[in-house]
Each structure stands twice: as structure tokens, then as C-alpha cells.
Amino acid sequence: MTALSALAVKAAETHVPVVDPTTADGPFVLLWSIIALPLAGAAVLLLGGRATDRWGHLLGTATSVGSFAVSLVLFIALLGRDESDRQVSQHVYDWIEAGGLHIGVDLLYDPLSALFLLLITGVGSLIHVYSIGYMEHDPRRRRFFAYLNLFVAAMLMLVLSENYVGLFLGWEGVGLASYLLIGFWQHKPSAAAAAKKAFVINRVGDMGLGLAIFLLFVTFGTTSFSAISAAAPGATETTLNWIGVLLLLGACGKSAQVPLQAWLLDAMEGPTPVSALIHAATMVTAGVYLITRSNFVFELAPAAQTAVVIVATVTLLWGAIIGCAKDDIKKALAGSTMSQIGYMMLGAGLGVAGYAFAIFHLLTHGFFKANMFLGAGSVMHAMDDDVDMRHYGALQKMLPVTFLTFAMGYLAIIGFPGFSGFWSKDKIIETALVENWLVGVCALLGAGITGFYMTRLMLMTFFTEKRWAKDAHPHESPAVMTVPLVVLAALSVLGGLMLAGNWIVDWLSPVVGHAEHHEPPIPAILITLLVVAVVAAGAALAWFLVGRQDVPREAPADVSFATKAARADLYGDAINDGLVVRPGVVLVDGLVAADRSVVDGAFDGGSSFLAGTGQALRRLQTGYVRSYALSVLAGAVILVVTLVAVNL
Amino acid sequence: MDFTKPELEYAELLPLFIVFGAACVGVVLEAFLPREQRRLPQVVLSMLAVVGALVATIVVGTDLERHTGLDGSSALGLVGAEGSIVVDGPTIYLWALILVFAIGGVALFAERQLEGGVSGFTGQAAALPGTDTEREASTRGLEHTEVYPLLLFAVGGMLLFPASGDLLTMFVALEVLSLPLYLLCGLARRRRLLSQEAAMKYFLLGAFSSGFFLYGAALVYGYAGSVSFAGINEAVRAGSANHGLLLAGIALLAVGLLFKVGAAPFQAWTPDVYQGAPTAVTAFMAAGTKVAAFGALLRLLYVAFGGERWSWVPMLWVVAIASMVLGAVLAVVQNDVKRMLAYSSVAHTGFLLTGVLGVQSAGELAEGQYSSLEGVLFYLTTYGFAMIGAFAIVTLVRDAGGEATHYDRWAGLGRTSPLVAFAFAFFLLSMAGIPLTAGFIGKWAVFTSALSAGAWPVVLVAIASSIVAVAFYVRHIRLMFFTEPHPDGTGVVTQSSLLTSGTVVVCLAATLVLGVLPGPVLDLVTSTGDFIR
């Protein structure tokens, strides 16, 4: 722990840039339309009903692509500006005016939100296209696209808002869309239960975010990023720590970090494009965005920052271990998502030195994880929606495009030299080692486990012998599904180019600040080699355990305790049950009993007491004027006496 | 002896002249038009008079000039009629409010469809109940159109009451507003004995309390050497030897006014009179008298005795607490709608007094906080609309014997007439102060002002009473919607003319808008500014 607190002290010395945007002009006046387009799409599809069934999916895709086009134009415009001039804000309208509370729908476009816009609309558009094929035979396809559009609009609101309340609006909006889409196949009880679980667990996180916003408002009298970033140094460290911890709680919920991680694995009940878009590439990274965006709080809140690092480290190992034991291809990928977000959170928790790498990893992860999820969807499409990898095997010949694109994603995620994940993960591990060796070693270990479970997944799916179901006839997916795969595969390979010439670090520095360069304890090249070696060891282990042996079609039951634990999501649900659900049930039972006896008793007793008093007082109402007059006289005496008594 | 012709500000006093003038014209019409031709001209005249006076009030209100009082404080308005009438921001607001309620009063008075072609007033007041003369008047379809001039005189008195600049004018206004009401209370077409008894009680007790008022005025004159509020204010601030004289004077003046607003322990007449009077009169009286009398009370206490407020605020604590507790507790055990509303009006008087005793000087108020005056004015607005609307609905629910006010007749009304039951429930919820209704904002305004003035014990009692009040309001809602109809049958909602239904709809809309979007009216209340001192 001493090492962790040393880290905390260092963070407080760094300089945090103030958010100080200029008013939108030129092409930037189009900023609002990025949100408005998919929102309009969702509105048309939901309100239009069946009338839009025939062309609904096309409209949904078009609005998303339109948003991407505008995002691209604005990005290019922003590139053309001076580094100091890259923050633009747009006031859309006054939203809430009550007393001292002024909240507008204000948008902030800066290097950070610019990257998010490209990721959300870019990957989002590809997934829209993919879904045209994937959901072709679903009778509720139009509704699916409406929800996707709703999600994209909410996510864009989340990353574009200039204040916490607008961010919260988007935050809740993506939560709603996530709920609707996880439970999209509502006829499956498991899907409905998963949606509910995700929603409930996210409420816990949302409550944290809500409290953080209240606390920000109480402390600073505003929720605007620019005002808070300017005023933050004036607040006490304790307050900022509380705000930071509450923000972290919010981030934990949305980004499936320990202890609020349990919903993500179940969320895989949703259609696969949803898993790719929402539960891998975009929404679950909102927590990383929140922490990076709130850097002006976290840089001054060392304890909160430490908490972020701890949560991230635990999660990156937690998710990776779960990923090792899952036979459901989507759940294995979900465990991996959890783990990779842990890396991002780790980067963000490391402060100025790490923010840029967190975002960098977020982007590359967005590419390769979306790629792999869509690839998994393609495999499932081929295998009649069977998700059990023990029923796959030797698919590389049957699904050549899927295999090749998936392989690109695989190489990227394990950090094969040259691929995008190599650059981004390596940077985070290096920074972690610089800041704190213990955390760094954990991150390194995580990379090794990643190598293991991804190789296992790859081998079980595409290599080893056939273990197909009897009536399985694997076939490659149509072009509308493979083209997005190819694009994402290319991005998975080339995403590392963003680090060329340290571009992404310089690009983000107006938002997250410049870090002083600290020399790692051992030369950077050695760290890189070490990471590669650890990953190779993990992959080799998988080869020996999976590739060299027969994979049983049924999962063996006589496995080690560790495997059992990992299969049970490291008992995440059991912990929730024991710590929260059962005490909650007991509490509710107690409250019901208390309500029956104490509250109802007091109420019934109170009302009969009132009625008794009323009946007694009623006798004063005799109906005789003489007694009324007497009461007036008595009243007059009381008034005089009171007045005189006060003046004695 | 020299006689100086008084200077009258005709332009600014126009609303008063319109109402009193129209009332006199109404009397003349009574004298010269044949009986069967009087109703329409009287209704039109009364309606024109109150609407015209309302327009005049708005015109006067839009260009009030700034007036600097004797103590250097400055407020919008002027002191007119040789110092006896003060037209300032609160006066204008109260005038407008009284006139709006008077429009509702005229509409309810003029309703004839409910009684099958005759008004709700007795055919011949002089005929003894149960005699052949009464039956003959009833079969001939006679009605008293004198009620319209009487109403106008009462409205005139209500307008003058809160605008009085001295104690004598205030007393005259008190009598001008009261006497027509005493008469109107005794004119019910059905249950005439009850009605006449109510009128008699109201008159006797009213006269009794007026005596207190007059005696108080004499004592205060003895102390201050002046009857004008400005003069009394000056004397109170200067201080003098006979302090006891002043204290007794304040108490006795307060008796007269607290009687009119129906505060405990001067509330005994309220249930009997509210129940006995024709419901149209009750509706108008409950809203209009309360507004006028609270206006007068505020002016008397804030302007004349503002310097002595540490003496009279504790007195109001006692009265407010007694009113809230008595009103709320007794309302619980009623089984007659009109009596329940009467006791609830006693409780509302207590809530309003909670606002009155929250008085603070401008310097003590936090930025953006509503003053007690503003809180009370807003509360009066919400209360008046809910009361008129509720009593208007009471006139609709009938059985063979006329209005069916007993709870048994209201059981199950929600099933037979859901719209009317819903409207009544909405008024009750507003009176209970449920959020999203006007009553909530009103309660919020007066409670916060009392709280910031340090009167937290009163606010605690107020909140407790509100909870008790919720019990009897909600009980009535349950009665309408969730209780099996009584074996003798549910009251029937009679089809009324547009006069009554329109009044209900307007009150409903006002209650809803004041609850959801109170901003504009709160701004209006704020812009009225303070009394001229």
C-alpha cells in the first residue's frame, strides 16, 4: 500500500488543463445534428410503427452513417485548428432553470469527444450494416434498428455534453437502450432476466453518478465541465475524493468493473451485434470516458485515483480468469472485454501519464473487439446459433473470411508485435510499471492470461477436430456481414498507427494535459520484450492444454477448483446474492413487518385518536349563538392576555 | 364651520365607483322594472360591473406611480380620498382576485337550470317557511333578483376593506361587506329554516365582533391620536406611555378581523353559516370574504402595527395553531360536505395566518425568497379557486330534496359521474397541498416564510395538521371512488348551464396551472411590491 500512496502524491503535482471552449462557428455549428440524426431515426422508426418495416433498417443505417460523415468533417476541421483552439462548445437550448440551477443542453467538441464520435458512429455504422444481414429473418428487425439508433444517439449525447447533467441523460439513455437490446429476444426468459439484471446493477452505479453530480453541484454550484475544471483547485481534497469515488462507482456500473461486473456476462443474451456495439466497443467504455473527462477532479483527488487503480487491477485479472474457463464463445469474449476495460481504467487511474493510453487502448479495443464479436456472430450464424465452442472446431476452412478477420482481431488483442493491441496495451503496462511496480506486474500477468484464453478460444473454434452437431452445415456469411468484418480487421491491424509520432498523446494533451516523462525502472524495449514473452508463454500454454489434446464435446466435470470458480464467474453472482440480495430480502421482509405493525398501528391508532378528539370537540359546536358569543369573548380575552404577557 | 370638498382620485378609484354605482343602479332597476323582467338586466349589469371593474383594476395597476411613505419607505401606488383609501400593489392584486371570484359568484347566482328554471334563492323571503304563501311563491316561480345588487354591495365592501387607509374606513368597509352577506345567507330556496338560522347567527356574532373592532379602534385612537394607519404607524414607532392601551387595541381590532376570516376561537359560526347559506353564496363568501379580510388584516398588522410586530406575532401563533388543529381535527368527524369544507376553511385560515406571522423586514429576506405578504397573496389565490370550484360542484350533486350534501349521497359518485368526481377530487387534493396542484405551492410559500422567520413550532403544527387534513380529503375521495353506494342511492349530478360548469372548468384550469406552472403568477405577486406605509 505504501507504493500506492506514493503514486497518489505524485499525481497531485501535475497540471490539469481547464476546459475553456470557444463558441461553435463554421462547420462546427453542425454539432447538434450528430445527435439529432440517429435520434430522429429512432423516433421515426418507433413512432412510425409497422409502416416503416420495409425500409426501417435502411433509414437506421443511413442516419448512423450520416452522423459518421458529419463527425468526420468536424474531425478534419478540428485537425486544421491550432492545438490551443481545439475546444468548441455549442449552446442548443436552456433545459432546466430553477433558482440557482441553470442547465443548458450544451455540447462540447474537443479532441477527446472527437475520437469518441468517430468510434461510436464509425463502428456503429459498420454494426448497423452487419445487422442488416444478421437480423434479416427477425420479424422485429425494424424495432431492433430503432433501438440501435436510440443507443447511438444517447451515447453521442453522453460524450458530447458539456455538463454532467447532459452526460447523465446520455448515460441513462444508453442504459435504457442496453436494457431494451439485451432483452430484445424477450420470449427467452434468460434474456429478460439478463436485461433486468443489467438494469438493476447499473442502477447502483447510476446512483453513484447521481450522487457525484449532486455533490458537484453543491460544491461548485454548477455542473458544467468548464466551470468545474476552473473551480476544482478551490475545493477541498476530501470533497474531491468523495466526488471521485462516487464517479468511480458510476463508472464501475456502466463499465462492468468489480464489484458491479456481474451483469456483463449475462448481457450476452442480446443479439450479437448488440454485444459488439454496446457491450464491447462503446457503452461499456463510458466509465473510462467519465473518468478521463473528469480528470480535473481525479488529478486533485489522489485517494479516488488510487481506488480507480485498485478496481482496474482487480477487474483486469478477474475478467481474464473468467475468460479462461468459458465455453460459450460470447461469454469468453465478454470476460475478455471486462479485462480489457480493466486495462483502460488502469490507464485512466494512472493520471496524466495514462489518460491518452487509456483512450488509445479504448479505440483499438473498440476495433478488435467489435471485429471479434461480429466474427463470433458470423460463426454462430454458421452453426445455427450454437454458442458452445466445444461444438465448433476446424472452422477455418469453412469460414475463410471470418477466420482471417477474426485472426487479425486475435493477434491484436493478445498484443502480437505490430498489431494495434500491441501498441496500446504495451503502453499501459509500461506506464503502470513506471508508476507502481505491483500494479505493473499484475497488468503483465493479465497480458499472459489474455494470451492463454484467446489462444484457447481461437483453437477451439477454428482449429482442432470437428465437434459439430449432427445437422450442422457451416457456411460463410453474406457480404453484408463480411464487409464490416474486413473493415474492422483492417482497423485492428492498423490502429496502432495512431501512436505514430506520438500523435494520439499530443492530440489529447489539450484535454488531459502533458505528462512529464518518467524513465521506466528498466529500459522500455526490455519491457516490450517481457510483455511479448509473457504473452507467448500464455499462448503456448493454451497450445499444450487445448491444441495438443482432444477437446471433449461435453465440459468435463472433474476439474480443479480454479476452473470451477472461473466457470461460475468467480462466484460474482454468489457474492451478490450473499452480500446484497439475501440481506435485501431480509430487510424488505422486516420493513413489511414493521409497516404492518408500527406504521399501520400508528396510523390506525392516530386516526382513532383523532376521531375521538374530534367527537369530543364537536360537543363545543352546540348550535347556540350564546355559546358561540361566549367563545368569541373568551378568544378576545386570550388575545389580550397573550399580547400583554409578551410585553411583560 | 368650513367644509372642504374632498379631493377624489376618480381614475384610480374607478373599480370602486363601478361596483358601487352598478349596485345603486341595480336597486333602481328593482324599483322600476316589473318583477318578471328584472333577472336578465340584473345579471347582465352585475356581470358587466365586475368585469368592467376588473378591467379598470388592471388598467390602474399597470401604471401606478412610486409613492414615498412617511417613514421614507417607497412603494408603488397612491394614497387617495383624503388618506382613507390606499391603492397600492397589494390592493390591486387583491381587487383583481376579489373581482375574479365575484365573476364566479355572479355566474353561480345566475344558475337556474339546477332548480328546474328558478334560482337557488328563495322565491319570497318574507313568506314563513311551511306556509301557503311560501308554496304559492314557489308555484308561481318567483325569485328575488335583489341578490344581485346585494352581491355587488358585498363586492364593493370587499374591495374597500383591504384598501382602507384608516380605521374608520376599514370599519365602514367591514359593515358594507357584511350586511349584504348576512341577508344573502338567509335566502336559500330549500331548507329555509336552516338558512335563516345561519343568517341570524352570522348577523348576531358579526355584530358582536364588530363591537370589538370598534372598541379596539377607539383604544388605538386614544393611544395614537389618529385613526389613519400612517399616523398610527408613526405613533407606534415613536413610542408613548400608554402602551397597554395600544396592546388592548390591537387585540380587539384583531378580534373583529379574525372573526371575519374564521380563525379559531372565532370560527364557531363558519360551519353553521357555510352549511345553511345557499351554496352559491357560500362559494362566493368563502373565497371573497377570506381574501378581503386577509387583505385588511395584513394591512392593519403590517402597516399600522408593523413597529409593534414582536407583540402581535405571538398572538397570531396562538390563533394559527388553534385554527389549524381545530379545523383539521373537526373536519375529520364531519359527514356533510359543506361542513367538511367549512372546517377545512378554518384550517386554511390557520395556514394563511402561518404565512402572516412569517413577517420579516426586507433586509432579513434571503435573495430570491418570497416575503410573507407574497406567500399569503399566492395562497389566497390558490385557495379561492379551489373553494369556489368545490362549492360549485356541491351545487351539482343533488337528490329529490335539493343539494345532497350528506356523505352517504357521495358514496360511489366516482362510478356514476367520474368527471365531476374527478374534478372534486382534484380540488380536494389541491386543498390538501399535494404536489403538482396549486395548494402545494401555496403551502410551500407560507411555510417557508414562517420557517425563515423562526416560527418553526407553528410550521411543525402546520405540517401535522396538513397530514391530518390529507386524511379527511383523501377519505372523501375514497368515498367517491372506492365505496359501495349507499342503499338509499347516490346523489345525481344534475346537468347545469354553462354558468356553473364554466366556473368549475375555470377553477379547475386555474388550480392545475397554478400548480404546474406557478412561475407567472408568482412573478406577478412579487411585482406587486409592498404596502404603502
Image (cartoon, coloured by chain):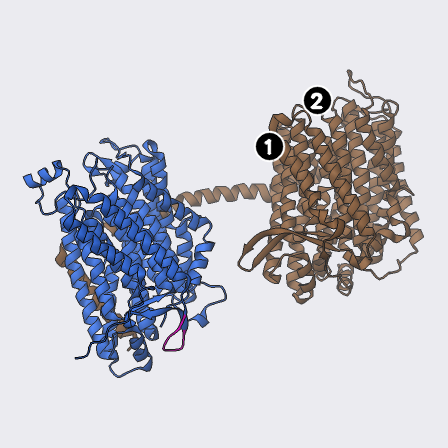
Chain colours: A brown, B blue
Task: Report the chain holding disc 2.
Answer: A
**Viewer-nearest residue: B322 or A102:** A102
Q: In which quarter of the image is the C terminus of chain A?
A: bottom left
Q: What stretch is highlighted in magenta?
A: B66-73
Q: Can you say whether A638 is above or below A289 in the image?
A: below
* Count of all numbered marks drawn on residues in the image: 2
Judged from the image, the secondary structure of the residue bearing numbered disc 2 is loop
- Relative to A552, is B499 on the left or the right? left
Q: Quadrant of residue A489?
A: top right
CA separation in Å, label 2 and label 1? 22 Å
**Viewer-nearest residue: B431 or B321:** B431
**Prevalent SS, magenta region:** loop
**Viewer-nearest residue: A341 or A466:** A341
Q: Can you say whether A187 is above or below A96 in the image?
A: above
Residue B121: horizontal and vertical position, in percent?
18, 44
Residue at 83% x, 55% y: name it. Answer: A437
Residue B82: horizontal and vertical position, in percent?
28, 72
Q: Does the magenta stretch include residue A599?
A: no
Foreground disc of the pair 2, 1: 1
**Viewer-nearest residue: B55 or A97:** B55
Is any part of residue A327 visible from this angle?
no
Judged from the image, the secondary structure of the residue bearing numbered disc 1 is helix
Query: Which amino acid is tagged 2?
Result: His
